[in-house]
Image (cartoon, rainbow, N blue to C red):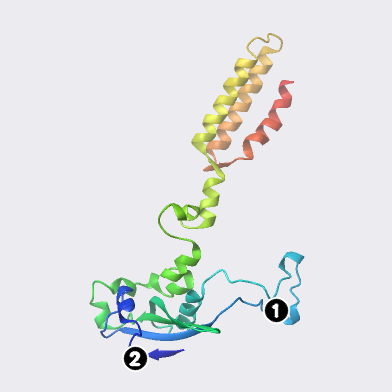
Amino acid sequence: MHRAPRPTRPDKARRLGYRAKQGYVIFRIRVRRGGRKRPVAKGATYGKPKSHGVNQLKPTRNLQSIAEERVGRRCGGLRVLNSYWVAQDSSYKYFEVILVDPSHKAIRRDPKINWIVNAVHKHREMRGLTSAGRSSRGLGKGHRFSQTKGGSRRAAWIRKNTLHEDYAIFLLSRLINGLLQLYTDITVNKGILALYLQVLFADVYYCIYSTIYVNKNFIPFLLFFYLPYFF
């Protein structure tokens, strides 16, 4: 890792935000290619067989994001703006990282770049906010990135696997109406049946409005718990 006097690819650097003025810095770094061996002593992982792997592991982040992290760790007072590929051989990949000095007056007075001065942009590279970091997180626009709508894969999974309260009320109302139509012809214990249905509706109504979301396993639990009272 070393500081470069000028970018090797000035056209690419300018497209990513670099300007040949005070406050901008270029660092060149190499990252060893290949997978990432698990850092355990003598190959002992002390876990289940699923986590016994040591050698054939692949990192979840790309090498460009790792290069940005290493440069950002060394230059803690600067902000990582972006990075780009420079060269590669059989052992290494070489990247150039664009950094910005947030305390320089030329940066603080420039309305096009002074957004990076805010404290929320400290160590963007550590939090997956750069272009390379967002790529490894699976973020993007279009139908190819529907698995990360909502901010992340976990957010998308939670949204797709939770039952919203309006839809839950709709399903439960149809269930209760079906039960009422099913037992309209029964004359024996009609008062007790109506009481049980009233208790069922009251409990479900309270549970739905006391929580924001209702898990999909909630309705089968209610059916399993209350239906034995009708038979």
Q: Mark 1 points at which residue?
A: 40
The percent coordinates of residue 108 (x first, y second) are 26, 78
Which element is circle 1 on?
loop
Amino acid bearing label 1? Val
Nearer to me, 228 or 17: 17
Cα separation, mark 2 vs mark 1, equals 39 Å
The percent coordinates of residue 109 (x first, y second) are 23, 77
Q: Mark 2 points at which residue?
A: 5
The percent coordinates of residue 127 (x first, y second) are 47, 70
- Residue 121's quadrant in the figure? bottom left
Q: In this view, does 54 lie to the left or right of 198?
A: right
Q: Is residue 145 above or below residue 46?
A: above
Q: Is residue 200 above or below residue 108?
A: above
Q: In this view, does 12 lie to the left or right of 154?
A: left
Q: Residue at x 67, y 73 (%)?
A: 56
Q: Where is the C terminus found, in terms of image quarters?
A: top right
Q: Residue at x 44, y 75 (%)?
A: 123
Amino acid bearing label 2? Pro
